Image (cartoon, rainbow, N blue to C red):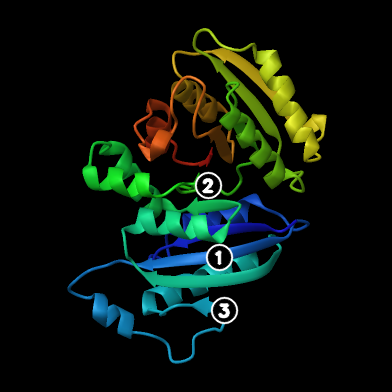
Amino acid sequence: MKKHFLVTISNDISNLSAVEFLCSFFKQESEHRITLMHICQLDETDMNSALMQMWEKPDEKIKGQLTVGARKAIDKSLQMLAASRMTIDEMVAKTVAERFGKVKDILIEGEQGLYDAIILGKRASYALQWLVERPADEIAQSILKDSRLSQPLWVCPKIEMDRRNVLLCVDGSENAFRAADHVGYILSRQDQHKVTLLHVKTGSGPDSQEIFSRAEAILREHHIIDARIESLSTWGLSVSSTVLGILERHPYAAVALGLHGLQEGLLKDFNLSGDTTATLLSKIENASIWCCP
């Protein structure tokens, strides 16, 4: 089955970290559909002039008004993807004017497009982090409550191209097992990556082996063989500090976790005030974060 990704890009062609992650993470064998989304920032002083800077004959696969900045970002993204080992069967680019704020606009497109994942680059992740740091902001709260994230959200800071494997955090919650299902689906034909199941015991809770057994069964349904699955159970004062410590020793390409954990609400009701998520978004610099609803 083709995997369909919504990839956000900015005008800064030197900072396309979401595209960089795709290029470094995937190999051929699998089939992909990619929608590149460029949002022209709403600015009263130059918005009209920016939207008038359109190319006379834009590519038929590009939907929307094409600004000079968008054209450069799209061209650079296409060059990077063409030079990668990733097999892409369909490519669409959308460029739109900002309507409700970038985070809101991205969530709306994600909801309407039925994507397998929404992939945010560095600039987009900064916008997301702004919401983490201002959880009481009334406008941000109303925006987040008005949209429902139904697809996994990947946040990609600057990526180290040689990183491999996925650290999958499982705590026994249904969201964690949905994260396992997402990881299995994404990695089903990417046998260059292994999966490490991580259970951080911070107090009372389900038995690690019970959690691992169910997560492993989910991964096997996606043809992830046992040789590609490892497990790690450890005590820790917090999940975030444990994950950060592991990343210092092991160069994982991604950390996957459920949006709603067993003990705390990770991105619960889209109020990004959970300590684990906020810390990981602010501290992880070289690996992507996959948050799964």
Q: Dividing the image into 4 quarters, which one contains the N terminus? A: bottom right
Identity of the amino acid at label 3?
Lys
Residue 67 relative to residue 221: left or right: left
Tell me the SS state at disc 1. strand
Which-is-in-front pick, marks 3 and 2?
2
Name the residue rendered at 43%, 67% in the picture.
38
Q: Quadrant of residue 47?
A: bottom left
Mark 3 crowd level (few <14, some 14–19, many ≥20, 10 Å Cα): few
Q: Nearer the viewer, residue 64 or 123?
A: 64
- Residue at numbered disc 1: 35
Res 198 visible: yes
**Which residue is the extreme one toward the top?**
204
Q: Quadrant of residue 88?
A: bottom right
Give the distance between the C-alpha atoms of the residues marked 3 and 2, in whole angstroms.
Answer: 26 Å
Q: Secondary structure at mark 3?
A: loop
For marks 1 and 2, the one nearer the N-term is: 1
At a point 65% along the width and 38% down the height, the residue shown is 165
Which amino acid type is marked by label 2?
Ser
Which residue, given by chain and number where applicable, does mark 3 sit on? 61
Would residue 84 be visible to someone looking at this image? no
Count the marks: 3
- Position of residue 55 relative to residue 154, above or below, is below
Disc 1 or 3, which lies upstream in sequence? 1
Q: CA distance from mark 1 to mark 3?
A: 10 Å
Please tell me which residue is depicted at 38% across the width and 29% down the height of the picture: 274
The answer to which of marks 3 and 2 sits earlier in the sequence is: 3
Where is 215 relative to 145, above or below? Answer: above
Read off the residue under disc 2: 150
| x and y percentages locating residue 155 in the rendered image | 47, 46
x, y (%) of residue 257? 55, 33
